[in-house]
Amino acid sequence: MSKPLIGISTYLEHARWGVWGMTAALLPAAYPRLVQAAGGLAAMVPPDAPSCAAGVVARLDGLVVAGGADVEPVRYGAEPDARTGPPARERDAWELALIEAALASGTPLLGICRGMQLLNVALGGTLVQHLDGHTAGPGVLGEHAVEPVPGTRYASVVPEESGVPTYHHQAVDRLGDGLVVSAYAADGTPEAVELPGGPWVLGVQWHPEMGHDLRVMEALVAAAAGRLSLREPELRV
């Protein structure tokens, strides 16, 4: 059987390389490397018109919504806190459309950091705009333990308390419709959320691509492989 194709959303930033300085679709190499190490094929999915999201997702076997900028508070009906970062409106619109398309089609979905927060917002939830203690300083990853909630999908993948690489100052506040918390930090911060039953949908607040534990990504790739096995006859037509 072919390896499943996992799309990963990208940053859209001004960047410099060689003699060039221009807007670029960027993705830290740790994301595709994690997908590859877990047995999938990685494809970058840069921002596009939200109306194109369903067509893009239809060509994927799984989707990762990557980390990045703070979600604009207007997306969940809040005024911006002074400590909330500048908006990334094109990414917000595109990635919310990707999430909605994945949920509608049953495409396995993993949200990482910002991606978990966007999943919550897409389902009507809200965010805490600032909290301390989940980084080791500007541009420096922290590490802390997360405790799985027994009986959840996440706990079936990582059943024990584990240390994770973390870098965020926002978090889930009110849960989106249908979501349950499947892991917590010691301070009570929700560190993973999921949709129980049905298609494989999980959000993690930490950065698995910056660690050595493949299990979360392997679980996404396995779910995507299962979806691919059902789709392969039609793909060969």
Image: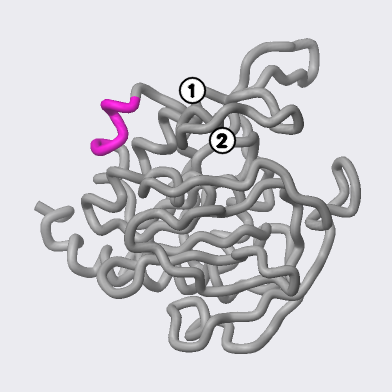
Residue 17 higher or lower than 200, as above or below: above
The location of residue 8, given as percent across then percent down, is 49, 46
Task: Tell me the SS state at disc 1.
Answer: helix
Task: Indicate the quadrant containing the N terminus: top left, top right, bottom left or bottom right.
Answer: bottom left
Q: In this view, does 83 lie to the left or right of 235?
A: right
Residue 109 lies within the magenta run: no
Residue under the point 74% across and 27% down: 82
Task: Tell me the SS state at disc 2.
Answer: loop
Per the rendering, the mark at residue 26 is none
Residue under the point 44% across and 87% down: 151
Per the rendering, the mark at residue 90 is 1
The location of residue 222, given as percent across then percent down, is 40, 73
Residue under the point 84% across and 59% down: 142
Q: Is the magenta stretch mostly helix, strand or loop?
A: helix
Q: How crowded is mark 1: few (under 14 residues within 10 Å), some or many (20 or more)?
A: some
Q: Residues within 10 Å of mark 2 (few under 14, many from 20)?
A: many
Residue under the point 50% across and 69% down: 181
Name the image colouring: one colour
Q: Name the residue under label 2.
A: 71
Tell me if residue 36 can be seen: yes
**Amino acid type of the residue that numbered disc 1 sits on in the rendered structure:** Glu
Chain part drawn in magenta:
50-55
